[in-house]
Image: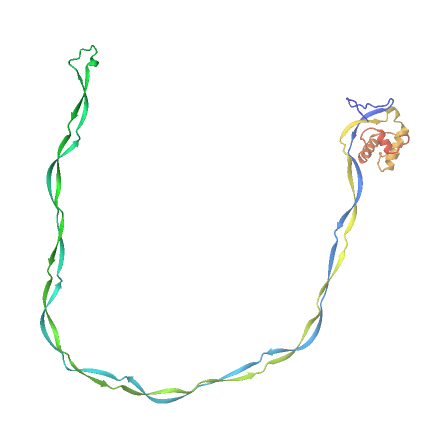
Amino acid sequence: MSFAQDGLPTNAEPGKCYAKCYIPDQWKTESESVLAKEASKKITVIPAKYKTITESVLKKEAGTSVRVIPAKYETRTEKVLVKEESKKIIVVSPAKYETRTETIQVKAPSTRIETIPAKYETKTETIQVEDATTKWVKQKDAMCQAANSEDCMVWCLVEVPAQFKTITKRVLVSPATTREINIPGANKTITKRVMVSPPVTREETIPAVYKTITKTVMVSPPKTEETSIPAQFQTVTKTVVDVPASTSETDIPATFKTVTKRVLVKAGGFSEYREVVCSKNVTNQLVRQVQRALLAKGYSVGPFGVDNVLGKDTRAALIKYQKDNGLPVGNLNVETLKHLKIAGY
């Protein structure tokens, strides 16, 4: 259906009525299978099986017994050295000395170098400072009668004598020299004691010194005697695993469930003109058909049931039906009548 600028339908048919109805969202119900519980595995523990056995076990390990046999000693007498033999020097006659006087050199003769300075004298000397030369000199000719004075000038080449000056200078007469001077040595007289004859000695032997001691000596060393001790066993009864515990794994399949949900088919939320039953055509028979259809769908039309009156209860039931089924809401529109399967629509 198309609409004019003012909102009224442009393709309206004569003899039909149109009213603004609220267009709700249009929904549809869909069913889908969803996972209720994921597949899993069940682990079943199978307990171990045991049995009783008898066996001989070591109670005490084999060992050895050790017995110590002490050492044996005896007392012995022994002569030991207390002081070794030595030598003693005895002076028979002492050394003889005499006093002597002797001159000794305390400083050796030497030489030293003496410097004789150079000798100078002052002399006066005349030296040439500038060579003899010539120069041109401009002079006026006294005999010249020319009107221009420049024409009367004469250039003469004049000798310029050399120039001298007297200077005083210090002249070396004799250069510096050196001479060697002898320095005599120094002597000293000393008195000293000198051995004339050495001492006379003789060597005397001092015998060694001994003493007798008594001591305990070991005749036989200590020793050990080892005896073997056998191991000890005992018989015990114990429970052992015959078949070890194990596990059994069982696959548990996933479970699914079917859920129903409403899915938006077309968004509404606005009003637009739709074809409605004209008021002159809202007859008791039409109202009765609508009420019966609503009751059949499970909608209450009021306490009086089908009364052929389009009252507030019937209108409320009609609006609820329209909302529940995504039909244009408001008025007795043609789409609702078709949905209710009213005869003639």
Residue at the spot 13% in from the left edge and 52% down from the top edge:
178
Residue at the spot 13% in from the left edge and 57% down from the top edge:
111
Residue 83, percent from left and from top = 27, 83
Q: Is residue 329 placed above or below 192 in the rendered structure? A: above
For the C terminus, the image quarter is: top right
For the image, the number of numbered tags is 0
In this view of the protein, can residue 188 be seen by the observer?
yes
In this view of the protein, can residue 305 be seen by the observer?
no
Which quarter of the figure has residue 201?
bottom left
Q: Is residue 117 placed above or below 15 in the rendered structure? A: below
Rendering colour mode: rainbow
Residue at the spot 79% in from the left edge and 48% down from the top edge:
257
Residue situated in front as seen by the camera: 195 or 67: 195
Residue 220, percent from left and from top = 43, 87
Which quarter of the figure has residue 56?
bottom right
Residue 179, percent from left and from top = 12, 53
Q: Is residue 284 left or right of residue 71?
A: right
For the N terminus, the image quarter is: top right
Residue situated in front as seen by the camera: 159 or 188: 159
Q: Is residue 35 left or right of residue 213?
A: right
Residue situated in front as seen by the camera: 16 or 229: 229
Residue situated in front as seen by the camera: 170 or 157: 157
Residue 99, percent from left and from top = 9, 73
